[in-house]
Amino acid sequence: MTLVLSGGTVVSSLEPPSLSRADVVVEGSRVTAVGGPPLEGIRLDCSGCLIVPGNVCAHTHLYSALARGMPFGLAPPRNFVQILQRIWWRLDRALDEESIRASALVGGLEAVLAGTTTVVDHHASPNAVDGALDVVAVALEQLGIRSVLCYETSDRDGPEIAAAGVRENERFLAQRRPLARGMVGAHASFTLSPGTLDACVDLSHRTGAGVHVHVAEDASDQRDAVARFGIRVIPRLEKAGVLREGALLAHCIHLDTAELASVKDSGVSVAHNPTSNMNNSVGHAAVAALGDRVALGTDGIGADMFAEAKAAYFRARDDDVSFPIGWPIARLAEGARFAGELFGEPALGRIEAGAPADLVVLDAPVPTPIGPDNLPGHWMFGLGSRAVRDVVVDGELVVTGRRLVKADQDELAAKAAEAAGRLWERCSSIGPHAFEPQEGDAA
Ligand SMILES: [Zn+2]
């Protein structure tokens, strides 16, 4: 089947920004031409629209999608560890197969309707570990969205569940799915024993898949590493063998100068989650010191990367009026580069002949001149997910006219709301998690 997106302005690359007025031809799963002679095929009229590369959310937790509006019931958390103990480590223990599926469908539909075509997910469901990643993968395939999945290995729920986490990553990594890839998921230094961390790294080295882990999201992660091992988090991960190209470190907030340099020099990727960081009041990542391998994630707060790019920009500008306006969209391009490596698709994130056809049609008037030089200004001050009209993933039209193509989104939301009610009920009977990091005097 040939799909011709005609009459639009094509943003063929975010970094460096590149624009042209051209028709985009999609055949099979790929873009086969941008411009050129008129072709026969199914025409999608894109007059007055911008056609942009699909966004990648480089760090999310789809399992949190049913938490929106969840009644709380406990004393409000006063710090990051209490947020985990009283919210997320209760919710994840309440997840079963039905709620994992509903969460993935809701998280996935919100992503794709917002123009996010790939999600890099970090999944936890300690009472339903075995097969959990298949449930997520199948749900996302049902919507037609691309994903990179892993299970969040952790010792916080005991050694058996930690071992099950490693096994689940290994099981999933052995599969070959068209639209999903795996990583080795690990929670964070402060919930990982030396043996469990070594098991994750061993799996990573045997399979070539990078470790996806939270790093120094809160200062307590550093205090714990120093109290338990006498070293800070980045040296601990470096010694264990995590810091290799293909690894993905989420947050990287409480790093000292030497750790920032290690991250930058090691070739690992970083997922920066500005909205989540602000929401949890955990501090600010020194993004300028982390180099170019920084992508953006939502950490589970939706999957709208237009909004996340703006949050990254305004948070940085709040400190520094000279912060470059091109930085956030270069980070979106970096997210696509990272995902492209996993799919063996170096052109993912660009709209050019030969690239995988993951693209988004934005239907909103562009009321001022637009070109490569001012694309970042349009992105920060104009474009948004509200304008997402059509979405193509892997050559398939998965959203058209702002509606899902492959699933009934109203039915899906109604079923999810029922599943959420049952999940909240189970969650209400689970108390705060007892796991505590060790407290030293580092950081
Ligand atoms: Zn996270």
Image (cartoon, rainbow, N blue to C red):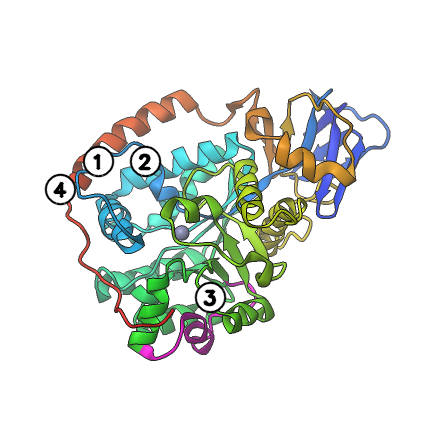
Which quarter of the figure is the C terminus placed in? bottom left
Which residue, given by chain and number where applicable, does mark 3 sit on? 255
- Under 8 Å from ligand 1: the CB of mark 3? no
Q: Secondary structure at mark 2?
A: helix
Dot placed on the residue nearer the N-terminal end, 3 or 2: 2
For badge 2, the amino acid type reads Leu
300 lies left or right of 27? left
Q: Which label sits on residue 429?
A: 4
Is residue 233 part of the magenta span, yes or no? yes
Between the residue at mark 3 and the residue at mark 4, the CA separation in whole angstroms equals 37 Å
**Residue 305: horizontal and vertical position, in percent?**
54, 39
Between the residue at mark 3 and the residue at mark 1, the CA separation in whole angstroms equals 36 Å
Residue 161 falls in which quadrant of the image?
bottom left
Magenta range: 229-247
* Tags 3 and 1 touching, CB below 8 Å: no
**Residue 143: horizontal and vertical position, in percent?**
47, 33
The residue closer to the viewer here, 422 or 290, is 290
Q: Name the residue at 70% across, 28% down.
A: 50
